[in-house]
Image (tube, grey):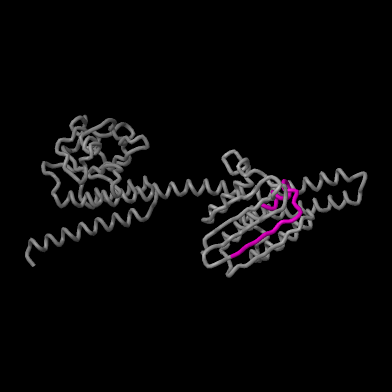
Amino acid sequence: MSTVDAHALLQRNRELFILNHIAETLNRTTDIQVALDETLAAVVELMGLQTGWIFLLDDAGKLRTAAYHDLPPGLQLPGQLPLWEGGCNCHRLFNSGELRTAVNIVQCSRLADATGDRRGLEFHASAPLRSEDRMLGILNVASPGSGTFTPDTLLLLSAVGAQLGTAIERARLSQQAVVLAAAEERNRLAREIHDTLAQGLTAITLHLEAAQAFAEPKPELAQRKIAQALALARTNLEEARRSVLNLRAALLEGRTLPEALKLLAQQFTAETGIVVTTTIDTRSRLSSARENGLYRIVQEALSNVRKHAAAGEVRIQLQQTAAELRLVIEDDGAGFEPEQVMPTAASGFGIRGMSERAHLMGGQLTIHSAPGTGTRVTVTLKTE
């Protein structure tokens, strides 16, 4: 092997080592600031440079200093903050779309305007930070001397910029996912509170109101209603405790969905006198998320029947085929105009909660009703 070939091999191995080291650094964190600081320090150290700094686009689309490493005194404010506000040559290239790969900025306007000790810095290299076609910022590195960075070094900086840009985009997506998960959790908590405490308190109130009405003419019936209210209070207290622990449907613990629905139907009939029939044809056990979601939809539909329908009968059908899973809750009650109560931002959690649950399971909820014709709630899901 010739001296030239050996040198090229050593250079290639050095570049691969640097890229691998930076990849490992970026894979250790999804925190954008940590990724910027650690990568910049690694680039400066491994490439034998003196300093570096990074600009990122902010929410307003303006480049801002996001990280810096070992800046010379002439480029710092008191307190070690970078003395860099306003544009410069690399900003101009970035904003014009010309900075597509790493380049030498031979005449750096920011360095030229700096006062104080620049430690011999005259120029720097700029590499775009990008994720696919999305431009995110600029990586700048500098070292004293009269020579410019070689084409091989610029190619390496371009590769580092692509690595860092991808990591920044990944970190931003991770942060967005956390925000979305928090919003989803708030919505789920609102549904859980409505499905447990709100429904339970509504039922207890109805029993106590009935007991109050029957206190004098029918004291025995009043006592029975009070006993039912107490039983519901105890059940809902236990449900609230379970929800605090794991926010799961307590009645599903240890039961399949068909078993839980049959028990729910029996309890509803015992409490309201409304006959509930269940027809269930499932081929296999559903996932926990689907069983809980479908159970809560049935629970909400029955709560609506209790409060609004004045029904004499409710039919619950759950059918699973090779292609889809269909849940139908149908009553023979008073009915209503669906357009007047369909889920909106201002509506209550009843119908909106059922619709959101169906959507979260990847399905669709439809409501068919009209005054005097009863109501049919249908949930359709693709078979898992």
Q: Nearer the viewer, residue 210 or 179?
A: 210
Residue at position x 13%, y 42% from top? 145
- Which residue, as the protein is rendered here, is positioned at the far bottom? 283
| 68 displayed left or right of 360 | left
| 283 displayed left or right of 275 | left
Q: Quadrant of residue 338?
A: top right
Verify whether residue 311 appears in magenta.
yes
Q: Residue 121 at x, y = what percent? A: 17, 38
Tally of numbered discs: 0
- Give the quarter of the figure containing the N terminus: bottom left
Magenta region: 301-319
Q: Nearer the viewer, residue 306 or 202?
A: 306
Q: Residue 274 at x, y = what percent? A: 77, 55
Residue at position x 62%, y 67% from top? 281
Verify whether residue 205 appears in magenta.
no
Q: Is residue 8 above or below residue 96?
A: below
Q: Residue 282 at x, y = what percent? A: 60, 67
